[in-house]
Amino acid sequence: MKTDLRRFLAVTAFLILGVSVCFAYQDKPRDVYIKVHPSHAYVWVDGKPANWGSQTLRLEPGNHTITVYNYGYELMTKQVTVEPGKNPTIEASLNPTGSPVSGPAGRIQIEGVPDDALVFLNGTTPGFFVGHAGEMNNNFWIVQKLIVPAGKQELFIVSRKTNQPIWSGPIDVQENKRLIVYVEGPSGSKNARMVYKDWEGGKDPTPEKRFDTLANAVSIAVAPVSAHLAADTPKILCDQTGKLTWSSANAAQTVITANSQKVAGGPSGNVEVQPKQTTDYQLRAAGPGGVITQDATINVDPTVKTSLTVSQPELRFVKVGDTIKEQESANLVWSASNANSVQIDRIGAVSGANGSQSIQATPSNTNQGEVNETQVYKITAKNDCGGSDTSQVAVHITGSIEPAVVAEAVPPPELPHTATPLPLLTLFGLATLGAGAVMRMRSRR
């Protein structure tokens, strides 16, 4: 009995150990090899910098976002699923983009930071990345150049290991000058010393390739940013639409805003807008070659204009009892421009920009007597932009309201006071005698 119990416990322990080992193996990070071209391209994993060049990434099982970028090439982003027991290989061959770059330009040289530190201009997302410090810190046997459009720029140097800024600040790139940025001081409080020297290469009119490498000599030529924003019409009425059209080149980020709210984005395009008041639209195109802003204004006219006329300002109304004997009518003609809400007192809401309405003489006072009343019709029109207008017209109603006429019985004609019934009796007697004589004559025959 004891032997069986020992065997059961041993088997159970073995199974528990096996399951534990299995789960531990499943949770173990896997090696993911990524091969990049060009060889200086930088790799980000889940938004954090890994390193430049082809490398082996140690990734936890699950889904990951791999971003590979090199200035002068199209950015590539891949979704990778790391599974237990598998060591995938990723190929990231970037396609070159953009034409060669011409001046005026200056050159930046960075000293005092690790070679794998990331260098950005005017932003810190991959689209603003211009290279790692090891590509721009040599001016001896092998010349490494970062060529940048002349003007004010914002420089960011970021640690690969911590993804934290090593140094950042404004710089002024001068035409045909080499700006040497010496980063000095302890971590967390580094300063930068700026030194300018003449750069003869800036006078060469030959356009530079955006990224060029020969042996270890690297040349990075950053293209200037350009942008344009226009409105198809400078003025609209309320509830009309306007169209914004924009374009940009060499920008990593292009955004159109109005009143601090994003309206549209992207390198180029068009968008319909329907502002309710005069609005300024701002385009900001930013890239490693600079920041360009453009403005466009659409003026909104909120003015509402109304008109109200009547075809006949004097109307008659006659009523006798319950019967209307006379009731004249007229035609109200109205218009309301640049409005989306129109109301006419005594009628109600109407639609459209113009119209007509028939009205009748209908006094509000129904008491018997003379009718002498003035009625006012008022139109009120409004729009969503705060505009409004009113117009009015008066109609004079005259006439009367009379009681019903009651018909009276007609009395028989009166006899003259001198008349007596005797003549009638005489006539009746004579007629009787005549009739008797006629009857006797016929009987004799």
Image: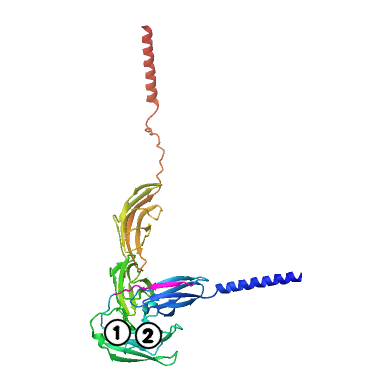
Q: Name the residue that disc number 2 marks.
A: 134
Q: Secondary structure at mark 2?
A: helix
Residue 206 locus on image (x, y percent): 23, 81
Coordinates of residue 360 in the picture (x, y in percent): 35, 52
Viewer can see residue 303: no
- Specify the quadrant of the image occupied by residue 222: bottom left
Name the foreground residue: 192 vs 234.
192
Q: Disc 1 residue type?
A: Gly
Start and end of the magenta stretch? 87-98
Q: Which mark is residue 151?
A: 1
The extreme front residue here reads 3
Who is closer to the viewer here, 360 or 380?
380
- Quadrant (top left, top right, bottom left, bottom right) of the N terminus: bottom right
Above or below, comparing residue 10 to residue 154 in the picture: above
Residue at image point 29% right, 84% down: 151
Q: Secondary structure at mark 1?
A: strand
Q: Position of residue 158 (x, y in %)?
A: 41, 84
Residue drawn at x 57%, y 74% as measured from the top left: 24
